[in-house]
Amino acid sequence: MRTGKIKSRQPDDTVPCVDYTGDPAGAAVYLDAATAAPLHPVAREAMLASLADGWADPTRLYAAGRRAQQLHEAATAVVAQILRVRPDEVSFWPSGTAAAQAAVLGGLAGRRRSGSSLVHSAIEHSAVLHAARTVEAHEVGVDRTGRLDLDAWERAVSASGVALASLISASHEVGSVQPVAAAAAYCAESGVPLFVDAAQSVGRVPVPDGWSLLSASAHKWGGPPGVGVLVVRKGVRWVSPQPQDDLYRPRPAGAPNLPSIVAAAASLRAVTDSGQSENARLSALVDRIRDRVAATVPDVEIVGDPVDRLPHLVTFSCLYVDGEALLHALDRHGFAVSSGSSCTSSTLRPSHVLEAMGVLSHGNVRVSLHSGVTGADVDRFLAVLPGLVAGIRAEVGM
Amino acid sequence: MITLDCLGQKCPLPVIRLARAIPGVPVGEMVRVLADDPAAANDIPAWCRMKGQEFVAGDGRAFDVRRIS
C-alpha cells in the first residue's frame, strides 16, 4: 500500500500538509454507483456493435436507416418487457434528468384543464424540484427514516386543482423505499396521475404498479451516461413541453443516441438477469457497513430505513466532521463516495433530503455499491474510516 | 444565558462550539447559538437529539438549547 508523505506542519498551516501526488494510499474503490455505476461489460459490447451497425438515422427509409430502426425497436422492446409495459409507452431521452422533467412538465401540460398544481414529496431529486418550481407546488414531508407521510399525501392529492403528483421510488440519498403502491392508490381515488422517478430502482428492484408516468436513468444501472427512459402509460394525457412535430407522443427533439440506447437496453437485461443474487450480496455488504460504522465511529448517525431500503446504498453522518474534508480524505485512500453536506454542494446548502428527515447533515457520506465492489473492498473502507474521522475531529479539537 | 456568536461560521463549526460550551453550562440552563450557516437550523436540533439535550427554539439565526443531562 502506498501512503502519502506527511511533511512537518508549518505554523501557519490551516490544513493537514500532505503531499498530494495523485496516487491514492490504496487501490481505487469506486463507491458512488448511485451517481453513476461503472459501465457494464455487456453495455460496452453492445455499444461497439451498434456503433458499427446503428449509426444511421432510424427515421430514414434506406437499408442503413432500417437497420438502425430495428435496433431502436429491439432496445425499446427489451426495456418495455423488463418494465412490464407496452413498447409504444417507452421513449428514450438524453438523460434521466431530461426524462424526469419531461414527465413532470408534459404530465402537467396534459392535465391543464383539470388543474395546475403539482404534489411532490420533500425528497424528490433536484431535477424534479426544479421542474416543480415552474408551477404551484405542494410538498409532502417524510419521517425521520425518510419515508413519505402517507396521511399528508392523501390530503394533498385529494385537494382540488391537482394536475400531477410526483414520488421518487426510493430515496437517492438515503435509500429508503417509498410506499409507491399506497401513494398510487390515493392518487387513483382522486383521479390524479402519479409520476414515479425510479432512477435508483430500475435495474435493481421492481417498482410497484399503479403509476401513470415513470422515468429511469441508464447510468444508474450500468448503462452509458446520456440515456434516460420515460414511460407514459396508455390513456395518460401528456403534452410535450418542447416544440416538436407530434406534441402528444413523447420523444425528445433531435436524432436519438442509438448506440447508447442499445447499450442501455442490453445492460438492463444483463443486470435484471443477475439481479436477485447480486442484490442479496450487496444488501449484506450494506448491513456490514451499517453495523461496523455504528460500532467503530463514535457520534455517528446512520440514516435511512435499515430494512425497507435499496440493496446497494447506505448513508451516515459524523458529528463535528466537515463532509468535504472527509470526502477528500477518503479519496486520498482510493475511496470515491458522495456527500449531502452543504460544503460539498454547489449551492452551499445541506441536502434537502437530510433536512426533510431532520437528520444531521454535516459529515455526511453516501456509499453506494455495484457489482465490482468486493467484501474485501468494503472491509478496507471500514478499516480506514474510523481513523480518518478521528483525524478530522482532532484537527478541530474534538 | 451564554451566547455563542457563530455568525459567519460554516457548519460544523457552530455545532462544535456548542458541544464545547455545554460542559460549562449548569444542567437546566440555556445556551443561545447565533449562526447563519444554512445547515445550522438542521444540525443544531440534530445534535440535541443525538446528545440528549433539549432544543428549545430556533428562528434561523438564533438557536436556544437547554442542557438537560
Image (tube, coloured by chain):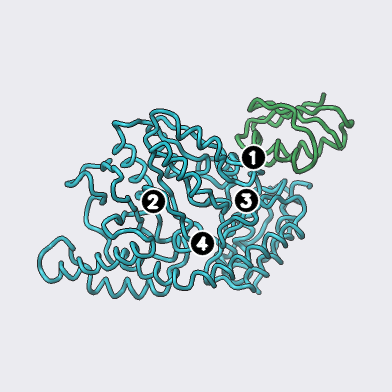
Chain green in the figure, letter: B
Q: Chain of mark 4?
A: A
Q: Residues within 10 Å of mark 4 (few under 14, many from 20)?
A: many
The nearer-to-camera label among 2 and 3 is 2
Provide the secondary structure element on which disc 4 rests.
loop
Q: Residues within 10 Å of mark 3 (few under 14, many from 20)?
A: many
In the figure, is residue B24 to the left or right of A348?
right
Q: Which residue is label 4 attached to?
A: A33
As measured in the structure, the alpha-carbon distance from the residue carrying label 3 to the one carrying label 4 is 17 Å
Q: Decide which of tag 2 and tag 1 comes sooner along the chain.
A: 2
Q: Chain of mark 2?
A: A
Return the residue found at the far left. Answer: A62
Instruction: Please state the horizontal and vertical placement of residue B16, each as a whole percent of the image.
Output: 74, 41
Provide the secondary structure element on which disc 1 rests.
loop
Provide the secondary structure element on which disc 3 rests.
loop
Instruction: Please state the horizontal and vertical placement of residue A36, each as a whole percent of the image.
Output: 46, 60
Q: Decide which of tag 4 and tag 1 comes sooner along the chain.
A: 4
Chain cyan in the figure, letter: A
What's under tag 4, amino acid-wise? Ala
Q: Which residue is label 2 attached to?
A: A214
Instruction: Please state the horizontal and vertical placement of residue A367, each as a whole percent of the image.
Output: 59, 59
What's under tag 1, amino acid-wise? Gly
Provide the secondary structure element on which disc 2 rests.
strand
Q: Decide which of tag 3 and tag 4 comes sooner along the chain.
A: 4
Q: Decide which of tag 1 and tag 3 comes sooner along the chain.
A: 3
Q: Which residue is label 1 attached to?
A: A358
Mark seen at residue A304: 3
Q: Decide which of tag 2 and tag 3 comes sooner along the chain.
A: 2
